[in-house]
């Protein structure tokens, strides 16, 4: 598994997420980490980003505003 050289803190900053939110996603996805500076494997970084975008698009969809 390759490393993306992308830390949890960088993902949170780049995607305007809280660290707590990214930690929760990692826990839900079964991704091991030690702290915000943990560098994620490429596949894990992509999974976190995709999960955050999916959750954000779901909470921002017109149906969720009803």
Image (cartoon, rainbow, N blue to C red):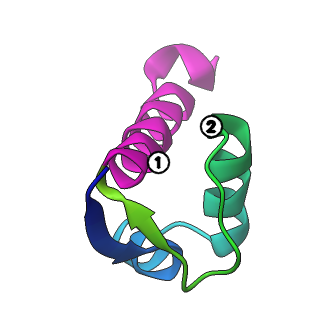
Of 36 and 20, which appears nearest the observer? 36
Residue 8: x and y, percent? 51, 72
Q: Quadrant of residue 10?
A: bottom left
Disc 1, SS: helix
Of 43 and 17, which appears nearest the observer? 43
Residue 45, magenta (yes or no): yes
Q: Is residue 3 left or right of residue 35?
A: left
Residue 56, magenta (yes or no): yes
In the picture, the quarter occupied by the C terminus is top right
The residue drawn where x is 61% and y is 60% is 22
Are circles 1 and 2 on residues that touch, CB within 8 Å? yes
Residue 15: x and y, percent? 38, 65
Q: Is residue 23 left or right of residue 62?
A: right
Return the mark for residue 48: 1
The magenta region covers 43-66
Residue 37: x and y, percent? 55, 86
The prevailing secondary structure element of the residues shown in magenta is: helix
Return the mark for residue 11: none
The residue drawn where x is 31% and y is 49% is 1
Q: Quadrant of residue 45?
A: bottom left
Q: Compared with residue 2, is residue 44 higher up or lower down, i.e. above or below?
A: above
The residue drawn where x is 67% and y is 59% is 21
Return the mark for residue 29: 2
Q: Is residue 3 left or right of residue 53?
A: left
The tag earlier along the polypeptide, 1 or 2, is 2
Residue that lies at the very extreme toward the bottom in this rendered image: 37
């Amino acid at each position: 598994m390759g490393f993306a050289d992308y830390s949890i803190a960088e993902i949170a900053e780049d995607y305007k997420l809280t660290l707590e939110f990214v930690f929760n996603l990692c826990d839900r996805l079964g991704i091991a980490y030690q702290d915000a500076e943990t560098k994620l494997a490429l596949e894990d970084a992509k999974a976190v980003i995709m999960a955050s975008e999916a959750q954000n698009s779901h909470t921002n969809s017109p149906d969720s505003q009803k």
